[in-house]
Amino acid sequence: MKLFWFLPTHGDGRYLGTTTGGRVLDLDYLKQVAGAIDNLGFQGALLPTGRSCEDAWITASALIGATRRMKFLVAVRPGLVAPSLAARMAATFDRLSGGRVLINVVTGGDPVELAGDGIFQEHDTRYEVTDEFLHIWRRLLAGSDAVDFEGKYLSVKGAKIIFPPWQKPYPALYFGGSSPAGIEVAARHVDYYLTWGEPPAQVAEKIALVRVAASRQGRRLRFGIRLHMVVRETEDEAWRAADRLISHVTDAAAATALKMIARQDSTGQHRMLALQKNGGSDRSRAALEISPNLWAGIGLVRSGAGTALVGDADTVAARMKEYAAVGIDTFILSGYPHLEEAYRVAELLFARLPLTHDDPDASPAARPTHAGEVMANELLPSAQRNSGAVAGASAASPVLVK
């Protein structure tokens, strides 16, 4: 298993739905959370994306120097940014961080938010855009001399990357999309397919569909899951903590939040909503425990990942192994507040899980670097063995120094 944590760039606190126990979200606090992730031994952290969050790329960039080994799973948004620019951003971050960026491809599922960003396409059309985006992005970072692409929505001519990424052929691509259109994009392009925390049987069904789709493309994918955690030393303590987490959420607040979440056209989001019973008015364990130790209370007010594993350490570890048995090897976890819960999860779960955070694909033997200034905005300076080389000698063959 690989375990990631979460950087709460849309806010944090001890309770949901209230400022009571809320944390001031600033760079100092994010450095504390990132420092915990880095020092405790998590593989890295997911940074959320959208207008409710601080920008993921700027936040992650600000934390490169405050961390040593953790990886940053940062979103690109097809339709919001050109694929060539996104490729340069990924290559730059990868080089400056020493190979510590991973890419989360987010097509987007909230038509209201998307309209605010100037995106008005229907659901399946957005995945067509994502497909074209990834065709260009992957070819650029894999080292093509120049990329020409003429698509229905995106086109480039002579696009290129001068400075290649650290990781080969490029930083790993993560992606979640539960609709048929989303699954087809995953099958063609990505390395890791992500799902939100549905019951294991539903996750197994989804993984089976994705595997078949990937097989048709001659590809094999790996799988990850996004879950919250409420893990304690005893089962009773864990369930009391879960109840406390939503103790400030009023019926009116839950109803309003669920109505806003329901406007999304995301298939995965609607699968999350379907896990709620009685419109969120019943807060009992019987209503919110949708599968053994899988609790839907967070989804009362939170879009996206809305479920948590709740229980004592042995039980939660056993539930995680159930997900591993159906094909999940990457767990992207979080808990409120994210600083303290990072420590709690590490202390209670790490020793109970078969963890491996080695990633040989991300650590090539030779990592290209460059020296000297780029010429004419395109040519890298040639390597010169003799410092007295004749002025005006040809530099038509740019060389990367290794």
Image (cartoon, helix red, strand yellow):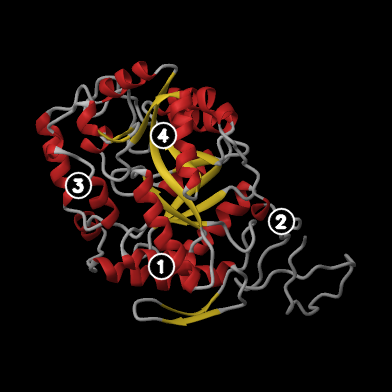
Q: Which residue is mark 2?
A: 364
Name which residue lies at 40% across and 43% down.
226
Q: Earlier in the sequence, mark 1 or mark 4?
A: 1
Query: Nearer the observer, disc 1 or disc 2?
Result: 1
Occupied quadrant, residue 23: top left
Q: Left or right of 210: which side holds 169?
A: right
Quadrant where the C terminus sits is bottom right
Q: Rounded to the nearest whole Å, what is the CA distance between mark 3 and mark 4?
A: 20 Å
Q: Earlier in the sequence, mark 3 or mark 1?
A: 1
Q: Which residue is mark 3?
A: 261
Which type of secondary structure does the marked residue at label 4 adopt? strand
Q: Rounded to the nearest whole Å, what is the CA distance between mark 2 and mark 3?
A: 42 Å
* Marking on residue 185: 1
Q: Position of residue 58 (x, y in %)?
A: 45, 46
Quadrant where the N terminus sits is top right
Which type of secondary structure does the marked residue at label 2 adopt? loop
Q: Amino acid at mark 1?
A: Val
- Asked whether the viewer can see residue 6, the reply is no
Q: Position of residue 53 (x, y in %)?
A: 33, 43
In the picture shown, does residue 292 fall above or below 380? above
Q: Rounded to the nearest whole Å, what is the CA distance between mark 1 and mark 4?
A: 27 Å
Q: Amino acid at mark 2?
A: Pro
Q: Earlier in the sequence, mark 2 or mark 4?
A: 4
Which type of secondary structure does the marked residue at label 3 adopt? helix
